[in-house]
Amino acid sequence: MKVKDKSSRLPGGKAALMVLATVILFGCDDFGSLNVDPNNPSQVRTELLLTNVQRDMGTYSGAVIGNLWVQYMAETQYDDDSRYSTTTSDFNGWYTGPLMDLQTIINLNTDEATRADALSGGSNANQIAVARIMKAFYFHMMTDRWGMLPYSSALQGSSNFSPSYDTQEAIYLDLINELKGAVAQMDSGPGVNGDIIFGGNMQLWESFANSLRARIALRMADTGQASVAQSEFVDAVNSGLITEDVMYPFMAEAANQNPWFARFITRTDYAISDVLSEYMIGLEDARILRYADPAPDFYTAGDEITFDNIRGMPYSTENPGDITNASISFPGMAIRAQDAPLPIITVAELHFAMAEAVERGWLSGSAEGYYLQAIEASWNQWNVYEAGSFANYVSNPEVAYNSGNWQEKIGTQKWVALYPNGYEAWAEWRRLGYPELTPHDFPLNQSGEIPRRQAYPTSESQINSVNYNAAVGSQGTDAPDTRLWWDVN
C-alpha cells in the first residue's frame, strides 16, 4: 500500500508564534520554557505569556521517555532509558515555567490594578478561563507522572517556598472542578490572543476543556470515585467534545521546530521498536507506513513503500550498537519533519473512551460502534484510510471487537492509536493493563519491571523534606514501582 503525504494545518495563532520564534528556545522533556520575572508581572503582555505556555505543550507531546516505556521506540545505541535507569525526573521547570506563567495571566486579569491593561490578551474572563484549562492540562500530566504533588499551596512564589503535597485523588477532583468552572466563566467578549492552538476560538476551548474532563474522569473509573467518574464523563460528552484532532503546530524554522526533527539533526538514537512494528505489520495495519520510515537495507529510493520495507529495532538487546542503522526503521517523517504536528488529544482517543464507557454502563449505544469509529478516526488522522484495507483490518480476529474482553481490545488498539503521544499511552497502559508488554531483558532498575511512575526530583527531599516525607509516607516509596491512586490493574 502506498501512502500519500498529509499536509499540516496551522491555526490562526501562527502570527503569535512567529513573534516569539526568534526569542524563545525550545524546552527539553522535563522542563517548561524559561519564565519571565514573576516579580514584575505588570511588564508582561498576557498574549505573549499564553503563546509561551502553549509551546510547552509541544515539549510534552514530543517527549521521549513515554515512547520508550510503552515500547513504541527502541534506542539504537545508548539504551539506558529503555532499561529504566532514568526514573527520577525534575518537575520544577513545569512550576517555574508554564504554570507560573498561567498563574500570572490569572493574577493580571483578576487584580483591579492590572486587569484593564491586560485586555490586549482578550476579555479578562476568557483569559482566566483559558489559563485555568491550561493549568488543568499541565497538572494532570504531572500528577500522572509523579502522583502526589504540590498543588493547592503551589505557585505562591516567595510566600511559600515549601508547599505541601496534595493527594492525587484531591488533585483529580479539583481538576474536574477547574475545567467546569473555566467553561462556566467564559463570556461573549473577545477571545484570547496569542493562542497558537485554537486561534482564540472560545468554542474550541470549551470543547477542549470537556475533552480533558472526559480523559480525567475515565482515568479514575476504577477508584473509589467511580460514581464521580461516571457522572463527569457523561456530562463532558453531553457538553460537547472535540470533533477534530488537537495537534501542536510546529513550524519549519529552528525556534519552533518539531523535537523529533531536532533530535535527528546530528544523531539517530531512536528507531521504531520491533514490538510495535511486528504487531502492526502482522495485521497489515497501514499506519505503520506513516509511523516508520523504510529501512535502507530493504528499500530502494523511489519504490513504493510496503510492509516489507519496515524493520523494527529489537527492543530488548544487550548491545544495540551492534545493529546497523541501515537495517532498521527510524520514526517516520510524519512525526519528525521539521513542521510535523504532534497530537495533544485526538478524536480516536475519545471514541475509544466512549466505547469503554458503554461497556461500563455509563453511556448507551454500541461499544463496538465507538471502537470502530476510533480506529477509523486514527486511520484518517494518519491519512491511510482506504475502505478495503480498513475492512480487512477490523475483520481480523485480533482486531475484531469482543465485549467479553473489551479491556484487551480497547487497550491494545488504543495503544496503537496513541502513537507517538508516549506519556498518554503509558498512562493508559498502566490503567488498562494492555497490551501485555514484556519488560526489557536487561533492566537497570532493581525490580526489572516497567516503571509505574517517575520518582520525585532529589531537590524535594533536600529543600522541602517535611512535605516530601509526608507525601512518601502517604503514597508509598519514592520508587518507580509504586502505583498511583488510579493504577489498580
Image (cartoon, helix red, strand yellow):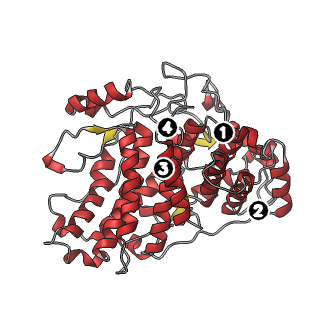
Kindly identify the amino acid type of the residue bearing the numbered disc 2: Tyr
Q: Earlier in the sequence, mark 3 or mark 2?
A: 3
Residue at coordinates 36% horizontally, 47% vertically from top-left?
A: 31
- Secondary-structure class at tag 3: helix
Q: Disc 1 versus disc 2: distance between alpha carbons?
A: 23 Å
Q: Nearer the viewer, residue 275 or 236?
A: 236
* Res 67 → quadrant: top right
Residue labelled with disc 2? 385
* Res 485 → quadrant: top left
Instruction: Reply above or below: 27 against 113.
Output: above
Residue labelled with disc 1? 273
Q: Disc 2 versus disc 4: distance between alpha carbons?
A: 37 Å
Kindly identify the amino acid type of the residue bearing the numbered disc 3: Ile
Q: Earlier in the sequence, mark 1 or mark 3?
A: 3
Answer whether residue 80 is visible to the viewer in this image: yes
Residue at coordinates 39% horizontally, 52% vertically from top-left?
A: 175
- Which of the numbered marks, if any, corresponds to residue 216? 3
